[in-house]
Image: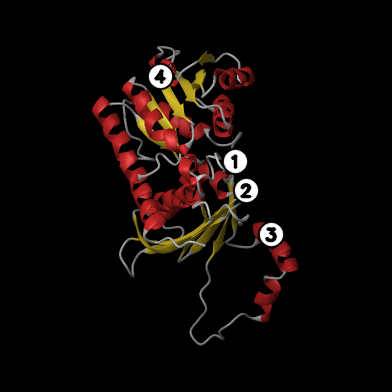
Amino acid sequence: MTGSKIRWGIFGSGGIARRFAGDMRFSRTGVLAAVASRSRANAEGFAQIFPGMTVFDDYRDLAASDQVDAIYVATPNALHKDHSLIAIGAGKAVLCEKPFACDAAEAREVAAAAEAANVFCMEAMWTRFLPIMGDLRQRIASGELGQMVHLEASLGFARTEGPGDPITDPALGGGALHDLGCYGMSIAEFLLGPFQLEGGSVERSDTGSSRTAAFVLRHGQAGAGALSTISVSHATQMRNMLVLSGSKARVTLEAPFIQAGYGTLSPIRFAEPGAASGPSLRAHLSNSLYGQKAKRMIRAVIPGHAKISAPFPGSGLQFEIDEVGTCLGSGRTISQIMPLETTISVLDTLEKLDGSQASTS
């Protein structure tokens, strides 16, 4: 360590690695130290953007360096297991980009290695660490939202398929289900607790890549727990919002919810027995284009409505960086916010959905 700072090495030099390095300046606990990539040219280009980093020719050489305390694995999904094991074998703390592995078996192998080596290891599910997510957990625990009923999340970013693209190529662990589905599933667990897969469907392209998926999770006991409905896609752009609904109030996070700094809390009003069913004229007007604009303008002054503000600089990856720093400072090898058992549970469920629940388009 440099003083009280965790010195970070980065495996990979792509877009997410650059976002991670860029957000390091907002971290309380970390500093950039080293980078390695599949080619030295890529690593040197990365170091030019973020000066002061030592460039290594090989991932193993970086992992063995005494200049590094923790390693962020930002390589393609299919390499996550092997690269995490390299870091663990060198005794370095590991923060591995989501999805943590290609399947639950790989995740269990990494978790077992980290436990045996007494090394910190965590999935970089950065959305769980955003301030607004902690705010929502507090509101749920306090009963402000009432009994939790439903979570709805959509996450879709249109992306053209291409061979060798780690985001869409199934041979590299790509596809919408693993690329985006893990977000919704992990956040549903974070807010509403452990879940069971109730059902779902996956639509695939001719290459076998999961292009669109939708699934339902049940939290708690049947008839007494909440439901989550989650949809993801690489085939279209979705609303990318999250709505958390309770018996007293609901919270809507602004898009994209995976990077949300703002939300709106709205009261729930129940119709009395005997009231007319179906939408009223008032409801039709309220849901019109002009009605929606008017609601956004006056929502701040309507009794019961409230703006939730939890802004932050950068992309928001600094919070997961600081979680690692906090855990290492206290001698913990597992994060209480993102435990490996939850990571494994999510991957296990994605695997079930990807196999027995899938349909081919």
In front: label 4 or label 3: 4
Discs 2, 1 touching: Cβ within 8 Å:
no
Q: CA distance from mark 2 to mark 3?
A: 34 Å
In front: label 2 or label 3: 2
For marks 3 and 1, the one nearer the N-term is 3
Res. 311 image quadrant: top right
Residue at image location 65% in from the left, 57% down from the top: 300
**Residue with the mark numbered 1:** 311
Mark identifier at residue 60: 4
For marks 4 and 1, the one nearer the N-term is 4
Res. 282 image quadrant: bottom right
Q: Is residue 8 above or below residue 309?
A: above
Mark 3 Cα-neighbour bin, 10 Å: few <14, some 14–19, many ≥20: few
For marks 2 and 3, the one nearer the N-term is 2
Residue kind at label 2, given as amino acid type:
Thr
**Residue with the mark numbered 3:** 296
Q: Is residue 311 above or below residue 358?
A: above
Q: CA distance from mark 4 to mark 3?
A: 53 Å
For this rendering, which residue is in front, 82 or 31? 82
